[in-house]
Image (cartoon, rainbow, N blue to C red):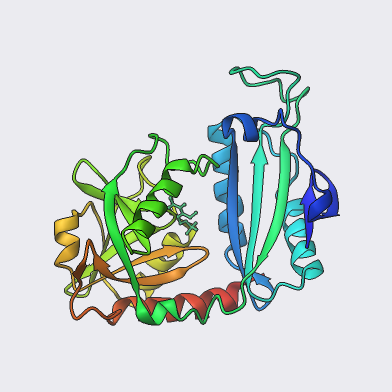
Amino acid sequence: RTVYVNGDYLPETDAKISIFDRGFLMADGVYEVTSVLDGKLIDFDGHVARLERSLAELEMASPVTSEDLLEIHRALVARNGIEEGMVYLQITRGAPADRDFVFPDPDETPSSLVVFTQNKPGLADNPAAKKGMRVISIDDMRWGRRDIKTVQLLYPSMGKMMAKKAGADDAWMVQDGFVTEGTSNNAYIVKGGKIITRARSNDILHGITRAAVLRFAAEAQMEVEERNFTIAEAREADEAFITSASTFVMPVVEIDGVKLGDGTPGRVAPRLREIYLEESRKAAI
Ligand code: PMP
């Protein structure tokens, strides 16, 4: 696989980053994951817009323009022959002369850019979407700026492990009694045909897939309510689902061992998945 590191396209085994890079030492970095269908990028502009926001919130400079980023993404997709999969990009605050909590001067320490692809044949035709996933609920113990897409992913990884050990597929995190989001996705329930999901704030990542799905839902005359919901309400919902760039729309059929409705994916989530795949394939670049 060819990867991109700070201006160079290299075999992955030759790619190197300094041990003083603040991404490595302090998780001082941001990332984006863009999915690829039919060899094209899904919602690339949305991911770049969120990347720019994450960078601005952390006073971090991008080493390249958004046009360069698009070119790098396309070059890697072509070189690695990706038809279905993902492009991962990460910008970290670079490698200053010494370890220090204070941000280095960006003129002396340029940030680092790493981009690589992941080949995932069958991403769109994922059998898991027909079966639905099982989630458990856990405390949300992450920091308070989840709207910034940082590479600080230890708690979400721990959450995924808790789910795995419990025989489930993922965890929904709960703060002050209300669901925030999944470990790597936004969370939704459906009640009486109405789609309910937490409103955007610093408490959740503003999902690019979330924005697209809510837009498609409104266009299809589905009712959407952006508000908090509890695990108790979720367990009594007709349906539930998650969204993310790598899973699109994925039904949730069980929460903390309790089956939702008849324990099958239901109507709304599969329909939204279909609409999302169709519309985003059309708009892919
Ligand atoms: N929430 C969290 C915590 C995530 O990590 C992700 C995916 N990275 C999402 C939501 C979904 O965001 P997107 O639709 O942009 O992939």
Image quadrant for the N terminus?
A: bottom right
Give the percent coordinates (x, y) of residue 17: 76, 38
Figure check: 236 above or below 60:
below
Give the percent coordinates (x, y) of residue 116: 71, 56
Camera-nearest residue between 20 and 114: 20
Image quadrant for the C terminus?
A: bottom right
Figure check: 130 above or below 151:
below
Figure check: 166 above or below 129:
above
Give the percent coordinates (x, y) of residue 11: 83, 56
The residue depicted at 79 percent of the width and 69 percent of the height is 78
Camera-nearest residue between 190 and 165: 165
Tell me, yes or no, if residue 258 can be seen here.
yes
Give the percent coordinates (x, y) of residue 67: 74, 53
Tell me, yes or no, if residue 224 can be seen here.
no
* 253 on left or right of 207: left
* 36 on left or right of 207: right
Figure check: 253 above or below 147:
below
